[in-house]
Amino acid sequence: MRHLKRVVTHQTALEKEYDVVVVGSGISGSIIANELSQKGYKILILEAGPGKDLTLSGYEKYLNNFYTATSKDNNAPYKRNPNASMPRSVDVKKKKPGKPNADSYLVQNGPFISDFTYSRVVGGTTMHFESKLPRMLPEDFNVLSTYGHGLDWPINYEDLMPYYRKAEFEMGVSGNVSSQTFSKQKAYADDYVFPMKEMPPSYLDKCVAKDLDGAEIKLAGKTYSLKIRTFPQGRNGIPNENYKKFNNGELFKPVGAVSEHQAEEGERCQGNNNCTPICPVQAKYDGRKTLAKALGTGNVDILPQTVASRVVIDSATGKVDQIVYKSYQELDSDEHTTSTVKAKLFVLAANAVENARLMLASGLNSTSDQMGRNLMDHPYILTWALLPKIAGTTRGTICTSGISDLRNGDFRSKQAAFAVDIHNDGWGWATGGAETNLLNIVDNQNKFGKDLRNELVHQISKQLLLANMVEMMPDPKNRITVDHKYVDRLRNPRPIVTMEIPEYTMEGIAFARQLSKFVFQRLGAEDYSKYDPMDYGYVKYKDEDYAIRGGNHLAGTHIMGTNADDSVVDRNQKSWDHKNLYLVGAGSMPTIGTSNTTLTLAALCFMSVEAMLKDLEA
Amino acid sequence: MHLHPIETVEDLYNYLYVAIQLEHATIPPYLTALYSIHPGTNLDAYNLIRVVAVEEMLHLTLAANMLNAVGGNPDLTGEGFVPIYPAYLPDGETDFKVGLEKFSMSAIDTFLNIERPAVVDSRNIKRSGLLKISRKNISILPSFKSSAGEELHFHSIGEFYNAIAEGLKKLTKELGEETVFCGDHSRQITAEYYYSGGGEIITVNDLDSALAAIRLISEQGEGYEGGIFDYEGELSHYYRFQQIKLGKYYHKDDKPGHPSGEDLSIDWDAVYPIQSNARMEEYPKDSELYDGAYEFNKFYKKFLKELTVALNGKPEMLLPAVGAMFRIKEMSYQLMRNPFPGKEGITGAPTFQVDSI
Amino acid sequence: MDMNNEQLDEFLEMSTVLTAFSAYKLKGTGQLEAYFNTVVEIVGKATMDELLNAYRKVKKAANNDETVLNKQLRFQILSNDKLGPITRNIIKMWFIGSWYQLPNAWRENYGEAEKDSTFVISTNAYIEGLLWPTIDSHPPGAKAPGYGTWASKPQISEL
């Protein structure tokens, strides 16, 4: 593949005419660029981050950065880039009363301080996402009319079904359809299977399932039976023979590492236990896999180190006239040039926070004034315990299975639904991982030699961490704003986050905590969960302590709806106000249920492509 | 062992056994050179050699699919299956040595020999691709005894595969395709259990698929019709290695011998100074290095056994067997980082002596 | 760096006691010289001499008795306010490939070295951390054991 040739310079881009300008080379931008370019349209992608990531050696540099980073947070593989900063959990601090936290990229206005992150590099946040890819449930699309909370979508689950299939093909989903039934409504055609067979459950999963499967819990007057099931994942496994009928009779062909030269790598997951922050062999899907195809058409150019700075509207037509961008030369210098780019169609695919930030920075609050509002994420409450026996923790993909039985039910009229992940990587997310155990054993428990080794086994190989991902509904008060007081090095306004965890969600969090206690009791596991009031994510609710973590499933900042007064975009993610502008990604989602957002946003992009093609043909 | 002209299905079994043996025989030399590279250095060369080694595994699997297709039983566990290195392979009228050595220009020259496109000198060669010469070394490729009892030698590995193709055609003609390809199809390794980007696994159930498998093996090695790429558009092994020798990547339209792409960065010194063609018995018996080499051989023997199980009707066992490759790498590094007692500046290396266990 | 082979061997031997891994396994990580050099660079050659001298005394006193050796190691080295923190750092390097900044008290008493901050020694040091084989696993992001291997019981036995 000669995709490197498509990484163009500023000068080259200026001399060409493009049909479509896409802001952002993450999964949304890549899907749209790929689909449109296959039809012959000329696309220019503006990418804020550096563009050296499309070669194996470029990727190896990321990997090296990760290996040698003392903090292995989600963005550890990427050099700090003040020209296009990204949030990092290591920068998050407890909020002081009375003023926002403003000393790192995200300005946090509180009252809740989240450590959510996203990546501003080629491939976007899929570079560090875990690639857990469940669909949303049919009920999630009508959650307001069904349960009286949140918003209804302008589309139904059925409308999205064919596009879910496209997304599952594009991302190469491994999974088992039969483990995905917790809706009262039919969610999959009878004979449908995912492209690849489910990732084998870890030994840890099996240790938990042995004593938990079949356990019953009561919630809002109903009894639910629990079962450990696998999650669908965008990770290469064993192609499913039965998928052939959905793939023109062909076995699904897994897509390996992105490389200029033959790589023979990444066609199958090896169990590196490092999906987040970085899969070393690229067996995990990331947006570059789609981007490489798009660049391979010869119709797509990408302009890296180019930050979209302002969307300019033609006051006569209300259409977007051009995008002003700032293009920088070096990561460690603020030297840059400012220029503009025009096209027939503009697509903002920069993610929920950055899309809203760019629109608001351009003074475009939308007719509905909903731009930047309804910011959602999945708050996580982590619970952790030590199992009575060795369970082989730290092996496998980050997560293979969990509890999904409480993703839907009548209780949703009172409290948030949630899904529970069994973390194969142990306590890392909560405590800092095996390193923390080692330091404690050496420095405080004063062990060396054999005793040290035995203690490591005892303290790490029995770890069980449950990550409870809780539903959060849209609330116009939770929002992204900008203020020219807060700008980055290129003088682009930084996003200001105002967020509070709604009571509905807190009820779900409280129940999830109780469920963990029940699970640990059944397994005979010692509960080590502890929530420090000094923790930045600390919340006290009904006299109980919680420390809440961000899920990086940012959504809702430009929600879709039925008219220009209630929403920012229509069902095709097209702006109500500006007829040649699409705002795509999870920002368009009015609710997010208990599904990691990427599969749904990918499906939405496939759906939007059809509307874009119509616009382009017109 | 001598090979005869392929007259019977039994003869075919012998040829395909040799094919599997031959494909395997290239793996220890490639792995030795690969793992002798200091991790994290020589990334271009490392990836080039790694990819070739992966494809040799594919060739081995394809040969096993062919053998299974005609009703044979692949066996990687027999005595003598793994050659004693240095071993010899034919290259026209002479042999060349294939040894276990560190990443070096001399190792790359050997690899180029292994993958060299056959240049047929028609003066001294029979129609069948056989040569009448005397060879003093014991080659991995057995000699050939004609029906008249004449001792001949294959000109090259390519000619050996040609002989298999001819034999398959002949038997199919004589006995009928269904009689020849009578193997149980469930014994085939399918793409479910084996896949890699460059060259897909071919399941063999008739003459066409068998010939396609042979074609893939020869073209991945040597190139297609004299070009530098195989028919799938991947650079052939020979030219991939030549890139290391010449220090430059090939581009799509380059002529053989004249790559015009980016430079490879090669550091011949970022390599463990391993003992070439190391032998377990040369390590001091009471040393940890000896124990390490012994453990390695034991593990490698187990690996071949598991592979044999997978290739004999349990394709799902291929995944755990291939998983063992990670351990082989780890154990190789340990050997290569430990000094060879009594040899200044030389370290150990895996010996691949499975018959000594 | 000028490396004294005899010292390196002593460092290796002491490391086998501290980690309960054999000399072969320790050398097999390829990190022996790097860890030795890191200690010397940060605490200086004289302190390294002091540490290895102390170990020599411990060994002499133990006279091949493991119980005595372990006890003497605690008396002479691990509980020593100068040598203890360095030795614990050596253990940590072997297990996870990082150097950790020495405690403040140590830095106040024995001087702050410019390089004495918390850092990962190198990519390979991270990859070769012995914590991972101890729990029949691998460092996150490296040395993966292969598809599906996570489904089976780990091979861990108490020492």
Image (cartoon, rainbow, N blue to C red):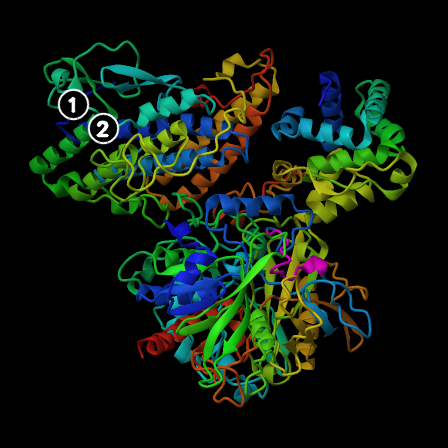
Q: Is residue A88 magenta?
A: yes
Q: Is residue A462 magenta?
A: no
Q: What residue is at 64 percent from the left and 81 percent from the top?
A: A415
Which secondary structure, mark 1? loop
Q: Which amino acid is tagged 1?
A: Gly
Numbered range of the magenta stretch: A78-91
Label 2 neighbour load within 10 Å: few <14, some 14-19, many 20+: many
Q: Quadrant of residue A111?
A: bottom right
Label 1 neighbour load within 10 Å: few <14, some 14-19, many 20+: many
Kindly check if marks 1 and 2 are in contact, taking CB atoms under 8 A apart as contact: yes
Quadrant containing the N terminus of chain C in the rendered view: top right
Determine which residue is flagged by label 2.
B158
**Chain ID at mark 1:** B
Q: Which amino acid is tagged 2?
A: Gly
Determine whether, in the image, residue A384 is placed left or right of residue A404.
right
**Chain ID at mark 2:** B
Residues tagged by mark 1 and mark 2 found on one chain of the structure: yes
Q: What residue is at 31 percent from the left and 45 percent from the top?
A: B200
Instruction: Mark yes or no: residue A194 visible.
Output: no
Q: Quadrant of residue B28?
A: top left
Residue B357 in the image: x percent, y percent? Answer: 47, 21
Quadrant containing the C terminus of chain C in the rendered view: top right
Q: Which mark is residue A509?
A: none
Determine which residue is flagged by label 1.
B129
Placement of A109 over or under C45, stated as above or below: below
Q: Residue furthest left?
A: B174
Depth check, front residue: A409 or B344: B344
Q: Earlier in the sequence, mark 1 or mark 2?
A: 1
